[in-house]
C-alpha cells in the first residue's frame, strides 16, 4: 500500500505540471493538490487543512512576466505526504508539513529557473527543425518542454518518497517540542501574510465597507466561512448588476440625446 501511495504521489506531481502547461483540467493550487493527496493517503481532513494553510500562503503570489515564485503546490504535496507518513496528530502533522514543505516550495524557484533555461534549448531545436521543414520532428521536440517542467517536480517528489520519510522521523526524535510548537505558530501567522499580499492587489479602499461587514460577521457574529462567502457573493452580484444597469442607462441616454440633436434634412 505504501508503495502504491508513493507511486501515485510521484505521478500526481508530474501530471499536474503537464496539465498546467497544457489543458489545465486540474490546477496547481495547494488546495487542489490537498484534495488529490487526501484521496491517495486516505486522510482527507488533515490533507485539506494542510493544503488550506499553504493555499493562504499562495494568495497574492503570481509569476508575472515569467518570474519564478515559490512552488506552493509542490510544498503542499510533499508536506502532506511526509506529515501523514510521520504522524496522525493534526498539530504535529501541520508542523511537519510546514517544516518540510516551505523549504521545498522555495526550492521550486530554482527548479523553475532551471526548467526555463533548459526549455530555451528546446525552443531553438524546434526552430531549427521548423526551418528545415521537419514538422514531425518539431512536434516531437516541443513535447520535451512540458516533460522538463514535470521532471522538476517529479524528481524531488521521488527523492522525498524514497528517502524523506526516515529522515524526517529521525529529525523529529531530536528536535525539541518548543521548535515544533514554533512551527505551528508560524503556520498560523503565514496565512495572514498571504491575505495581506492579496489585499494589496485588490481595490480594498473602494470596497472597505464590504471588508468591514465580513470582519464583523466572522469576528463578532461567529458566522461560518460558507455564510460569509454567500453574503460576499450576494454583494458582488448586487454591485455587478447595479454597475451594469448604470452603464446601460447612461449609454441609452447618450444615444437618445445624440439622435435628437441631429434632427433630419428638413430642418436644414
Image (tube, rainbow, N blue to C red):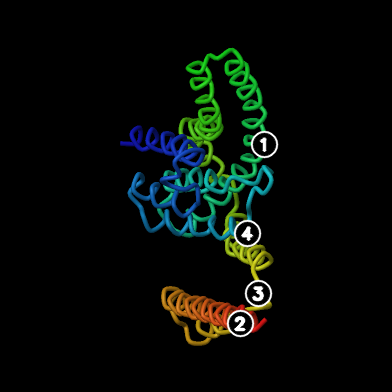
Name the residue beneath numbered marker 3.
204
- Give the structural element (helix, strand or loop) at label 2: helix
Compute the Cα span from label 3 to label 4.
13 Å
Label 4 crowd (10 A; few <14 / some 14-19 / many >=20): some
Secondary-structure class at tag 1: helix
Determine whether 51 is above or below 123 in the image: below
In the depicted structure, whether residue 9 falls above or below residue 183 = above
Q: Is residue 170 left or right of residue 268?
A: left
Q: Nearer the viewer, residue 239 or 34?
A: 239
Q: Nearer the viewer, mark 4 or mark 2?
A: 2
Q: Secondary structure at mark 4?
A: loop
Residue at point 42% right, 73% down? 226
Question: Disc 2 marks which residue?
Answer: 266
Q: Nearer the viewer, mark 2 or mark 1?
A: 2
Give me the C-alpha separation between circle 3 and circle 2: 55 Å
Q: Nearer the viewer, mark 3 or mark 2?
A: 2
- In space, the residues marked 1 and 3 are separated at their CA atoms by 33 Å
Residue pictured at 50% horizontal, 51% vertical: 29
The residues tagged by marks 4 and 2 sit, at their Cα atoms, a distance apart of 61 Å
Amino acid at each position: 500500500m505504501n508503495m502504491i501511495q508513493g507511486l501515485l504521489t510521484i505521478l500526481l506531481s508530474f501530471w499536474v505540471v503537464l496539465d498546467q502547461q497544457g489543458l489545465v483540467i486540474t490546477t496547481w493550487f495547494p488546495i487542489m493538490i490537498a484534495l488529490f493527496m487526501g484521496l491517495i493517503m486516505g486522510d482527507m481532513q488533515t490533507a485539506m487543512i494542510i493544503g488550506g494553510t499553504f493555499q493562504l500562503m499562495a494568495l497574492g503570489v503570481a509569476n508575472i512576466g515569467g518570474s519564478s515564485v515559490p512552488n506552493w503546490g509542490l510544498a503542499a504535496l510533499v508536506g502532506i505526504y511526509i506529515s501523514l507518513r510521520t504522524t496522525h496528530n493534526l498539530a504535529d502533522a501541520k508542523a511537519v508539513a510546514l517544516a518540510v514543505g516551505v523549504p521545498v516550495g522555495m526550492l521550486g524557484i530554482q527548479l523553475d529557473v532551471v526548467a526555463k533555461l533548459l526549455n530555451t534549448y528546446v525552443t531553438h531545436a524546434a526552430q531549427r527543425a521548423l526551418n528545415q521543414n521537419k514538422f514531425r520532428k518539431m512536434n516531437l521536440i516541443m513535447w520535451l518542454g512540458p516533460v522538463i517542467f514535470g521532471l522538476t517536480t517529479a524528481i524531488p517528489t521521488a527523492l522525498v518518497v524514497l528517502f524523506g520519510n526516515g529522515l524526517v522521523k529521525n529529525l523529529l526524535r531530536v528536535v525539541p517540542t518548543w521548535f515544533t510548537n514554533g512551527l505551528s505558530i508560524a503556520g498560523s501567522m503565514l496565512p495572514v501574510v498571504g491575505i495581506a499580499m492579496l489585499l494589496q492587489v485588490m481595490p480594498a479602499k473602494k470596497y472597505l465597507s464590504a471588508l468591514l461587514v465580513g470582519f464583523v460577521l466572522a469576528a463578532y457574529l461567529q458566522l461560518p466561512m460558507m455564510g460569509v462567502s454567500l453574503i460576499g457573493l450576494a454583494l458582488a452580484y448586487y454591485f455587478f448588476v447595479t454597475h451594469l444597469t448604470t452603464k446601460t442607462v447612461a449609454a441609452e441616454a447618450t444615444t437618445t440625446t445624440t439622435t435628437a440633436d441631429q434632427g433630419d434634412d428638413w430642418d436644414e
